[in-house]
Amino acid sequence: AEAGHRIPPRAARHARALGVAPRAVRLKDTRTRWGSCAPDGTLAFSWRLVMAPDWVMDYVVAHEVAHLREMNHSPRFWAQVARLSPHRTAAHDWLRCHGAGLLRVG
């Protein structure tokens, strides 16, 4: 329930900043990835993301929203992520260190 109140508004805010609109924002019970962006524009996130610090959750949401503009990991993609999430490097490092433990919850 908490994820449903925290993740979609962040996605909407980041999407507005980039001038894009996701087709849908869904929460899933995934254990292998934090988020995804489907070719049809649907964003999906692990509900476990709410257990990460806010700035980490914000980075993951920004990362997936940026895929609505750039469906790759090119320099242009990373420039969009950096525009939306100033803590992207620290958040990425945090997930590398602590993410596996969170994905095992539940």
Image: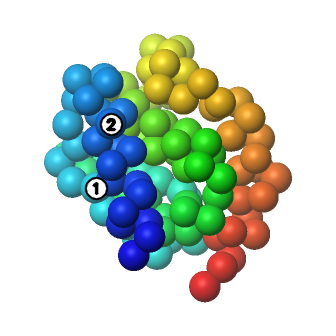
Image position, residue 28 (x, y; %): 40, 70
Q: Decide which of 72, 42 is in the foreground and name it.
A: 42
**Cα gap from disc 2 to disc 1, whole angstroms:** 12 Å
Image position, residue 44 (x, y; %): 37, 57
Q: Residue at x 52, y 43 (%)?
A: 58
- Residue behind mark 1: 25
Label of residue 13 in the image: 2
- Can residue 39 be spotted in the picture? no
The mark that comes first in sequence, 2 or 1, is 2
Image position, residue 45 (x, y; %): 43, 59
- Can residue 88 be spotted in the picture? yes
**Does the residue at mark 2 contact the one at mark 1 (Cβ under 8 Å)?**
no
Give the left or right position of residue 63, taking residue 38 as reference.
Answer: right
Q: Residues within 10 Å of mark 1 (few under 14, many from 20)?
A: some
Query: What secondary structure is found at the residue carrying circle 2?
Result: helix
Relative height, residue 74 to residue 51 (above, below) = above
Relative height, residue 97 to residue 93 (above, below) = below
The residue mark sitting in front, 2 or 1, is: 2
Q: Residue at x 54, y 21 (%)?
A: 82
Q: Residue at x 54, y 29 (%)?
A: 85
Q: Residues within 10 Å of mark 2 (few under 14, many from 20)?
A: some
Query: Type of residue at label 2?
Result: Arg
Query: Type of residue at label 1?
Result: Val
